[in-house]
Amino acid sequence: MIKYPIYTDDFMYDEMKIYEIPKFLYHYTSLDTLKLILKNRTIRFNRLDRVNDPNEARTLNLPNSNTAVFVSSWSDEEEESLKMWEMYGDNLKGVRLKFPTNMFYGRNDPIVFEKGGCHVRYGRKIKIDRQDLTYPMETSLIIGPNKVCYTEEIDKLVSQAIYNSEEYSVASLYDLGQFKTLEWSYENEWRYKIVAFFNEFSLPNDKFTKDIFDLNKFPIIQEYIDVDLDSTIMNEIEITFGLEVTNDEINIFKNFLKTNNIACSLKNSTVETYV
């Protein structure tokens, strides 16, 4: 019988062979999105029902579970990937970002916990609102960065999220968004996550608890969450321009950096294209 959560410290070490957390992570995006990131000094976490894999974050007993998880996706691959450039880097007209792992406000380092892998303590409060439900959920916890596990095992892809006893119910959303099918393995993805429930918190089996777990009747309002970057990382960021970015676009971007008093490291892509 499968014991949830599957994504634990032992699973990271024994099954995924992860012995240390990267100091830096990489993200492919467009020039326009990069300007928003730097101007607003935020990273956007998108709700999992809004990302490119509609089969993510399925559970046995929490309908609409993919609306309860927000993610920011990165890679630990130092070598550039042509496929990632084409899919996420605006088809070589965008950029690849290199950010320190402790990028968020407060600059707390990730710590590996027994359940759920790495966690980061964010220096501010994150509020998640529910339609027609009086009490919002507030947290300062970001789960991650954790490497996605690629598998075809249904017990990993479809997890159990709610545990019930006669008196209490407990939510465990650690596994949601941590397992994807093998077709996505080229991404070598690491994720930060924000979940809309307190993990491993016992709630009485009453009407209020049932309402909290009812994502159909009381849906989550936000489709994304913008998380503040720490201002001290701005000069540690490395930006790689795609092969199709023009010299004029690079010069305009350099002026943007100067206007916003940002001294990022800039370089040009050396990825090899198809012959």
Image: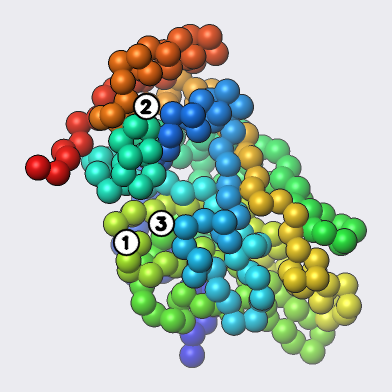
- Per the rendering, the mark at residue 239 is 2
99 or 36: which is nearer to us? 36
Kind of residue sitting beneath label 3: Lys
Q: From this view, report whether residue 143 is shown above or below residue 267.
A: below
Q: Quadrant of the C terminus?
A: top left
Is 247 on the left or on the right of 135, as rendered?
A: left
Q: Secondary structure at mark 2?
A: strand
Q: From this view, report whether residue 90 is shown above or below residue 146.
A: above
Q: From this view, report whether residue 96 is shown above or below residue 189.
A: above
- Measured Cα–Cα span from mark 3 to mark 1: 11 Å
Residue 121 image point, x, y percent = 62, 45
Residue ID at (87%, 57%): 135
Is 175 on the left or on the right of 267, as rendered?
A: right
Residue 86 image point, x, y percent = 31, 44
Residue ID at (39%, 44%): 88
Residue at the disc numbered 1: 185
Q: Is residue 13 visible from the viewing direction of this image?
A: no
Residue at the disc numbered 3: 147
Kind of residue sitting beneath label 2: Ile
> Mark 1 or mark 2, which has the lower sequence index?
1
Is 237 on the left or on the right of 266, as rendered?
A: right
